[in-house]
Amino acid sequence: MGQFINPYTFVPFPGRDAVLDRGEPAGHDRPVADGWHGTIEWEFECVSPLLVRWPTAEARTYDVPHRPGADGSRRPVLPGSSVHGAMRALHEILAGGCLRVFDPQFSPSYRDPMREGGFDRWRLARVEQVDNDGRPTQVRLSEPTTRVKGKLAFSAFIDAAALPPNLTSGDRLTISLPEASDVMYRPEYKQVTSVRRDADGDWVVLLTDGGTRYRKAEQSNGPRPQERVPTAYFIAAGRLGSRTIEVTDAAWAAYRTAALGSDDYRRANQQLRQSLRAAEEEPRDGAEQAHPGARELAFADYPAVRPIPVEHENARGGSRHPVYPFLHPGQVVWARVENETVVELKASWFWRHSGEGTSADRVPPGLLPCREPDALCPSCRMFGSAEALEPGTEQAGPAAQFSYRGHVRVQDAIAAEDARIEQVRLAPMGAPRPGAGQFYLRTGGPGGKGRPQMAGEHERPLREWGSGADDGQARMFRGRKMYWRTTDTPPRQRFKARSHHSEELVSSVKVFTAGSRFAVRLTVENLTAAQVGALVCTLDPARLFHRARAKDSTVAAQSRPEGLDAADETFVVPLGGGKPFGFGSCATRAIRLHRLDPAARYRHGDDGHRLLGDDETDALVDAFVGGDHPEWLRRQWSVASRALRLGHVDGSLVWYPPGADWRVLEGALALPDSDERQEAERNFDSPFAFFQNSVGWQRVTKKGVLAFPLTELPTITEADQRLEIEK
């Protein structure tokens, strides 16, 4: 069937009780004893393409930034802020820093699995009133329509072929129904006794996304993909009653959380941000302009419902309402009622539900972002800490700041004159999905041994937050996410947009090609020798790994694959964007340290800078490596070396979970641009089968029990990182 390697892995967190080396920073008002001041000149070479997005006036089109030179030329650069951020992220791993960029309040949502029942508990509800934020305050409920299997049914699912064409969610009809079909999940009707459009009709309809209402035809021989065959498209209908009731705060909060993760809302936000960048809007009424990347579609941006066509051959021209975290009067949703109030809402019959807990529950508490300006982790003491919440609270006034300025300044990295720039059409990159527990959560040992592999039909699938795999305690995140460092694999080149990708999601970018070289200057002040050594190791990880191996046989045994000589290793620093595509692998070519004597500013003819020799630089590295570090941090070095080693895994197999064998992609790439090629590439790029078949769940069907055992991402230390392709 074929195998693949996931593009990312995780450097494991230490245990729940891990404590960081937090302490008071050196400050900026006086020098520390034997403090280190000076500059570091770093030269590096791209061993894979380097992506720097610099917005242009044209939507979805990006240039590379330039800086004017002393001779009037314009030199392409990598912004110093980008280098600073990448250094900070790597330093946190190598020096034991906190999770500075981390959302402790994140909670995922999940699609509802197909399971029997529910038609006697859920009913359609039309929104009657909303507040100024789009929160429904009153809804009108549907009444019972029939009995199925001895239970009252509050809705009907009618084949679109039996209803008028061009329906839109919220339309009113007058319907007469026959007996319902005896189906496992819900009351379905292939035909109706009579139906007509009626603005005053007592029936209301709900149309939803048709993307999953397909089946695959029998597999053809050879590399050709399976054909997607549309099934019947059923429209939900409910007979409205006269009573209206309120929606509880908890019901709305859960609906809103789930809607925030909808594809409709994700696409709407992408379009909004692109339009803001293109328009380059000016701040109004003296208000501060938010960065376009921080804007999200709000109720005020969407004053009226704009239906969108249902993409399904059998929907007969129907339109649906997009799923956003706010509603308008006249929209129709599903509601579950208890004690005359709505206690749960959902946008479709099989929709989404929230996971349990927040991301803060799934990391060691000691690794959460630093909050106290006088108790900072090693990374915050060096690079600074931005904090607007008052220590010990969750609130702060608009001007409150409890931040600390760092001791490292990074100038723009200037490209060499022979650096080459190439324009490419970049494939879409999706947002991270930490809710995918089979990849993001630590369930057991290698392969998840020691934990159940499947949940029962009426239980949460084991991949979910709050499932039985949590076993009374929230499973931990696997660790810090890192991407395998690989080189290009023509003709596959997973970064290139393919024929099936929507033009709304494809962007035109310029990348520095492999072989391009850069030079950047860092200025540091008031650091200890060990801190400077840690900075050198961040810029050149090979120095850390080689010296750590020499000092610690455990590190040496764990960090290098069997048979690989140290001379054959290339360790890289990840820079720029596009890391899921293997972009941004940069190898150090030279590091020069100049130490500054602050007193020299008072001496005539002496700039105070002294170039350090190799032995002195090595001594700084030794000061860091030989420091009093916890055992978990030393283990972390050996593990991190795998993710920073170029070619640690077979780059030709690295891809997000494919939906077809590699032969399908290779066959498609050999075809001219055509519908056949587009369909083949779409099937290959679809991860649906993998994530459906790996959730850790089972359900009963008319044909028997369908089992989907939990399939976990291999740990970073496993020699074999391959996973089976699911079709």
Image (cartoon, helix red, strand yellow):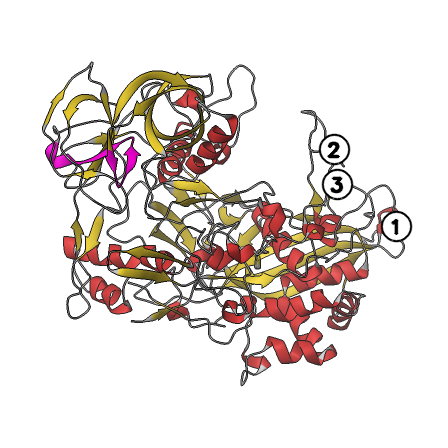
Q: Earlier in the sequence, mark 1 or mark 2?
A: 2
User: Dot 3 surroundings within 10 Å: few (below 14), some, or many (20 or more)?
Assistant: many
Tell me if 84 is positioned left or right of 486 in this view. right
Q: Secondary structure at mark 2?
A: loop
**Disc sitting over residue 599 in the figure:** 1
Give the residue at mark 2: 390
| Rendered view: 93 above or below 194 | below
| Alpha carbons under labels 3 and 2: distance apart | 13 Å
Question: Which residue ends up furthest to the front in the rendered image?
Answer: 150
| Residue 652 picture quarter | bottom left
- Viewer-nearest of discs 1 and 2: 2
**Residue stretch in magenta:** 147-162
Q: Earlier in the sequence, mark 3 or mark 2?
A: 2
- Viewer-nearest of discs 3 and 1: 3
Quarter of the N terminus within the rendering: bottom left
Question: Which residue ends up furthest to the bottom in the rendered image?
Answer: 563
| Residue 141 picture quarter | top left
**Disc sitting over residue 404 in the figure:** 3
Residue 425 locus on image (x, y percent): 32, 50
